[in-house]
Image (cartoon, rainbow, N blue to C red):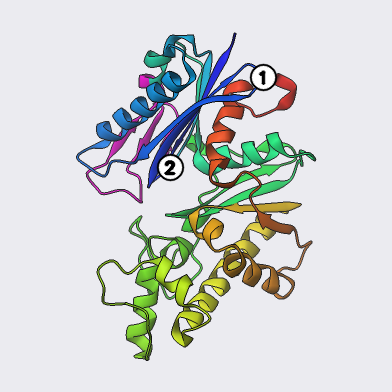
């Protein structure tokens, strides 16, 4: 029997699933993404969860026919690695992926994608309509998009198309992104940076708030939990909605999707507070067709399921390759 593996390497977690030839998931494992000492530690974590997923499926890794990986970027596709990821510490420089997994599985059929490209592959593969023009947008530790236009998933130079979180949405550049550049969408609206944005607004306005802005553990969770009851927290969420809508409007104008699926921890944990402000602003921001905007159908598994679909279809996600 054929077996396939999907791997999701994110800035927060790494997970792997194993499926049989029918696509039925028969094993899985996950762990936290290491933040030290180097990229090799991350590679070892990927290998570990892949082995454990195979063990959970009751198979030896050598029985795996093919694997797909959805990973944080930037990518170096020629070397099958992640290079200097923006949302991990600077000591995490290079993360080899395809080579070590090829050795583990004893196959050269290991396909590497940007995580959001894996996401759009997954949404398209498992969608009943299988639309040719669609986007998967993640709002999580970082922000990015996988884009499918005319039935083709856009990969770009070195697999780095779709890094929409690094679009400049604030020309004043008040906040610096994890990549080191100013004014990027991700600097304001990603899970990692929402607390920094809230602190920036707090210091600028000097307002009363129940938000624990001076607590070292202050997080995006606090902002969304207090919104509605706390005037300042409500204002922060409204501002996030403005920036998110601006970013999504740019995506619509660039790629003309029929539908945009939104995932990532920020959206999945706060769907109404994240998606409703985007939908409400589309008519006033978009000059072309306004797409349907909805939460991902695959939940937190969207990237790993897309990576699995890639493995099953020779890296394409095209159902006709089955």
Name the image quarter holding residue 205. bottom left
Which residue is pictured at 53% across the width and 35% down the height?
304
Q: Quadrant of the C terminus?
A: top right
Question: Where does the image place residue 146, in percent across and percent down from the top left?
Answer: 59, 45
Name the image quarter holding residue 303. top right
Crowd rating for badge 1 (residues with CA inside 10 Å; few <14, some 14–19, many 20+): few
Q: Is residue 119 magenta?
A: no
Q: Which residue is mark 2?
A: 72
Q: Which residues are magenta?
A: 75-100
Q: Which residue is mark 1?
A: 22
Figure check: 215 above or below 177: below
Question: Where does the image place residue 290, in percent across and percent down from the top left?
Answer: 76, 62
Q: Earlier in the sequence, mark 2 or mark 1?
A: 1
Q: Is residue 95 magenta?
A: yes
Figure check: 57 above or below 94: above
Which residue is pictured at 26% across the width and 44% down the height?
35
What secondary structure is found at the residue carrying circle 2? loop
């Amino acid at each position: 029997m054929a077996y396939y593996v999907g791997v999701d390497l994110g800035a927060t977690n790494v997970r792997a699933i194993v499926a049989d030839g029918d696509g039925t998931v028969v094993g899985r494992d996950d762990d936290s993404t290491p933040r030290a000492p180097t990229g090799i530690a991350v590679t070892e974590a990927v290998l570990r969860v892949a082995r454990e997923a195979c063990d959970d499926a009751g198979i030896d890794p050598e029985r795996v026919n093919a694997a797909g990986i959805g990973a944080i970027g930037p990518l170096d596709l020629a070397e099958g690695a992640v290079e200097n990821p923006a949302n991990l510490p600077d000591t995490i420089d290079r993360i080899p992926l395809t080579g070590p997994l090829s050795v583990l599985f004893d196959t050269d059929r290991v396909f590497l994608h940007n995580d959001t490209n894996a996401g759009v592959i997954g949404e398209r593969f498992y969608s009943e309509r299988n639309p040719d023009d669609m986007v998967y947008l993640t709002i999580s530790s970082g922000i990015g998009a996988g884009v499918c236009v005319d039935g083709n998933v856009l990969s770009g130079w070195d697999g780095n198309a779709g890094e929409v979180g690094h679009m400049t949405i604030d020309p004043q550049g008040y906040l610096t992104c994890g990549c080191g550049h100013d004014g990027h969408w991700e600097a304001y609206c990603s899970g990692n940076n929402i607390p920094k944005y809230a602190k920036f607004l707090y210091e600028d306005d000097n307002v009363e708030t129940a938000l624990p802005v001076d607590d070292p553990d202050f997080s995006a969770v606090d902002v969304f939990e207090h919104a509605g009851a706390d005037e300042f927290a409500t204002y922060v969420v409204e501002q996030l909605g403005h920036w998110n809508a601006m970013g999504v409007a740019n995506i619509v104008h660039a790629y003309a999707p029929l539908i945009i699926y939104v995932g990532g921890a920020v959206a999945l944990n706060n769907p109404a507070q994240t998606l409703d402000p985007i939908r409400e602003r589309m008519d006033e921001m978009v000059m072309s067709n306004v797409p349907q905007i909805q939460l991902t159908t695959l939940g937190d598994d969207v990237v790993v399921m897309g990576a699995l679909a890639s493995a099953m279809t020779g890296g394409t996600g095209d159902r006709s390759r089955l």
